[in-house]
Image: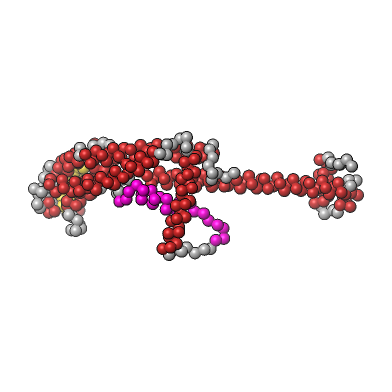
Amino acid sequence: MKRIDLSREQLEEVIRHRQGGLSWFRIQDKTGISRRVAQRSYEQWERARSIRELENVRVKVGEIEMQGHIDVLDRFAQRLVEHISVPEYPSFARDAGAHFTLLMEREIVVIRREGSSVPEDKSPASNDKVKARNVRRNRLLLESLKEHTADKFRWDSLDGWMDAWDTCNRVFPGVRTRIGEIISQTFSSFPDLDEWFEIKNRDHKTLDILEEGMQDVLWKGIVTGDMGTVREMVYSNNIELAEGVEVLQITIGIRKLVQKDHREMAPSFVELCRGIIKELWVTGEVKEIRKAVEKMQSVVEEMEEVLEPLVFRPLILHTRCRLCPA
């Protein structure tokens, strides 16, 4: 028997009547279309509509998941750049591997389930599990990042960054010791140095303050690659205290020393400090650190260019990784 297909107008009439609550017999009476043909056509239309609706849902979910994928990857990328950037202060308390592990143990991806009321567990075992979970997720994100940027960034250069970080971690403690030794030698002819300045915390000696300031100045010079930083960060100026009393203030990087009232200050004090930095600048240890820092900066700058959100987010849409929504 030849199959009867309804025209668009006929199908729309059947749909209207059926959704209006009519039985198949009533529809047959009103339209003149066999109830079996009308029922078969209507059921086919319903199946097709369900499939279309499901596809629309999938597309919508896919859009949401893709947006989430982009946001999570972008967040991880920015955390990565921040974490490997050259520090503002020479704090190399751990080697490169341990430093990178700190990033991988952080909760960068927060997955929340609606209606969840599970209390946060503060036990040590739970903390270990959280770290392990974070490492697992962050490794997936790192691999995803590499897949999306494989043609834009040489990820093996990260090994060079780690070698450079380890160089700083290995060499800078010796530089700290050298700074202390040179400061002690330079100011050994001033046994009353602690009496020159107003120091609120008497547990802090003048030489200790100088040492901390010198470390900061030297590091800023290394990071900028410019010895001109020294003159900008080591200087003296008059400041006015209460009742119009002026005193001399010595600035050495992040630290300041204020002379005692009406005390004559050796005019060469600032130059002595600058001379210490210049002496350190040409040592083998500082040259080695300068070279390592330049390597770190080069890797970070290259990575920043690729992972800049204005560049990176569109890149994700034109590449694929195994975490990308299908």
User: Quick check: is 190 in the magenta stretch?
Assistant: no
In depth, the one of 237 and 75 nearer the eye is 75
In depth, the one of 177 and 301 nearer the eye is 177
Task: Tell me what residue is drawn at x 75 percent, y 48 percent.
Answer: 47
In depth, the one of 17 and 215 nearer the eye is 215
Q: Main secondary structure of the magenta part?
A: loop
Question: Can you say whether 79 is above or below 310 in the image?
Answer: below
Whole-percent x, y for residue 94 in the image: 32, 50
User: Quick check: is 114 in the magenta stretch?
Assistant: yes
Q: Which residue occupies the extreme top position in the image?
A: 151
Q: Quadrant of the C terminus?
A: top right
**Does residue 132 appear in the picture of this structure?**
yes
Question: Can you say whether 168 is above or below 261 in the image?
Answer: above
Whole-percent x, y for residue 48 in the image: 74, 45
Q: Which residues are magenta?
A: 93-116
Task: Tell me what residue is drawn at x 30 percent, y 51 percent.
Answer: 93
**Does residue 240 appear in the picture of this structure?**
no
Whole-percent x, y for residue 92 in the image: 30, 48
Whole-percent x, y for residue 44 in the image: 78, 46
Q: Quadrant of the N terminus?
A: top right
In depth, the one of 151 and 205 nearer the eye is 151
Task: Tell me what residue is drawn at x 14 percent, y 44 percent.
Answer: 269
**In which image quadrant can residue 281 be found?**
top left
Question: Can you say whether 250 is above or below 282 in the image?
Answer: below
In the drawing, does residue 320 fall left or right of residue 179?
right
In the drawing, does residue 219 fall left or right of residue 145?
left
- Number of numbered tags placed on the structure image: 0
Task: Tell me what residue is drawn at x 82 percent, y 44 percent.
Answer: 11
The colour scheme is secondary structure
